Image (cartoon, rainbow, N blue to C red):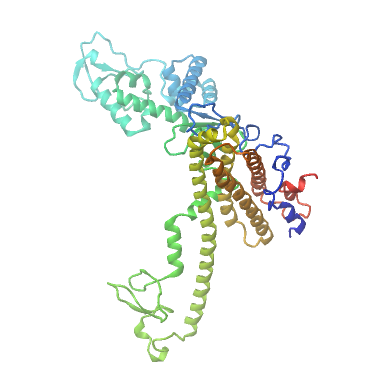
Amino acid sequence: MVSEDNVNSVSMEDDFDGCDYSDGYDDDDDDDGYGGYDDEDNGLLEDDDEDDPGSVVCRRTKQGYTVLKEADIKQRQEDDISKVSTVLSISKVEATILLRRYNWNVNQVHEEWFADEERVRKSVGLLERTIVEVSNASKFITCGICFESLPYDNFASASCGHPFCRDCWQGYLCTSINDGPGCLLLRCPEPSCKAAVGPDMIDKLATCEEKEKYSQFLLRSYIEDNRETKWCPAAGCENAVYFAAGGGDSDVTCLCSYRFCWNCTVEAHRPVDCDTVTKWILKNSVDGENMNWILNNSKICPKCKRPIEKNLGCMHMTCRPPCYYEFCWICLGPWTQHDVNTGGFYSCNGYEDSKKHLETKIRRDMAKNSLERYTHYYERWASNQSSREKALEDLHRMESELIEKLCNVQCTTKSLLKFITEAWLQIVECRRVLKWTYAYGYYLPEHEQTKTQFFEYLQGEAEAGLERLHRCAEIELDKFVTADGPSSEFDDFRTKLTGLTSVTKTYFENLVRALENGLADVNSQETTVGRKFSSPRSRRTE
């Protein structure tokens, strides 16, 4: 069990009110005492876009991953093509075909090529010499697809030399491009030929619309076929993320401000692992839970097999139209068999029926408790999700409207009001963490009572601290925004909000680390968790 002293050392109660916030936090990783997402701890950079106060601050990690816009993707793709073309002494068209075949892995292309160039050429469809030689002296050539004899100028061919008329080529390319990304692996229309059809043929014969589609397929393949890159999953976002191997934390933040897990591309969900998130999302499916309720609160009509809920006290059940079947709720037998010898219209007195009824009742009670437990965690999970969305809206409103207004009222500059934005960013992040702690708690083994109690205590302290921060940033700030002029109390408010942000940030970071570690130290009397979660007030010297 966790000792009483240790539990007290974890408390955040009253640590946010009535104390000196400026020195109430002495974490070595944050010497300036500034809360929120500071650059040093979280690797977040900020765009110096002072001309657009309505835009959310763009944040990008210093190391581990890089956010790529469309221009960045095209440049990287072109650089890789040029690199392979130069090293292997082949054309850029051939380099593009090679890279597409090996999922844009430059190192693998080099290794495979120098290990066995002939095998690579054969598998990819890069021919060293033309198979069919057609002399331009021939006045007319027969197309191998439409079998029409046309002038030489009306024909085109891939690297193999098989001649087909331009109309047939255009139809072939148009159909392939409209069918989807498979057009990136086109081969010569000649059934026995494996020669690759590259971007040069698309540029020569396709329409402008088809060229644009092909170009987009090629661009998307650079991201989707590469293990180190993924698209940002946010709706409407066209950015991608390059994640270096061994980049550490799997949470990444796109320039659109959406934060997601690199491994599963679901929204960032620390401290919960990806497997738990998958189970939780599946559990939350409406159809699954509705079916669970139906199975646990109804019985199946023996005749029409539809689920029926018992809404009156007697055991005589009558199914709805058009079935109208009458049966006993206890044994599901026909009601016509329930005469005075078996208890009349009131009960089944057979021993096996009673035993079955008892077992059914136990199963129903267990199912009901399970559903109530799930509902408890889901409601709080959803509530924090709603609060997080509202906090994001308030953050946008703060940056687009209120900061400017506050500058005018309090006669200050935007740079001096950065602490307010940092506080709201911290609120958004803490709401996300707190939301996922409920999924974490749902899957905690019920028999581990000590760990469950300690987890719920830490979670409760986190909620209390976050509510203090949220109230300060939302309610207490409002009186300074709506004031008639500068207030002498604004500096005190700045100190308080900065301190609350710093304390809350530290607590939640330690909470995430402890939960990711599985609360491994929960049974230790001299637990390190207690030191990690010790209150700022207990560490301040008099």
In the picture, the quarter occupied by the C terminus is top right
Is 127 or 288 nearer to us in this picture? 288
Q: Measuring from the top left, give residue 205's x and y in whole percent.
A: 29, 20
Is 297 or 105 nearer to us in this picture? 297
User: Residue 140's quadrant in the figure?
Assistant: top left
User: Residue 369's quadrant in the figure?
Assistant: bottom right
Residue furthest top as drawn: 137
User: Residue 243's quadrant in the figure?
Assistant: top right
The answer to whether one can see residue 248 in this image is: yes
Q: Measuring from the top left, give residue 435's x and y in whole percent.
A: 55, 50
Q: Measuring from the top left, give residue 387's x and y in whole percent.
A: 51, 49
Residue 405 position (above or below residue 124): below
Residue 123 position (above or below residue 507): above
Q: Measuring from the top left, give residue 474's x and y in whole percent.
A: 55, 45
Residue 68 position (above or below residue 295): above
In the picture, the quarter occupied by the N terminus is bottom right
Residue 26 relative to residue 331: left or right: right
Is 469 or 405 nearer to us in this picture? 405
Residue furthest bottom as drawn: 340
Residue 236 relative to residue 26: left or right: left
Is 363 or 540 nearer to us in this picture? 540
Residue at screen point 65% across, 35% down: 41
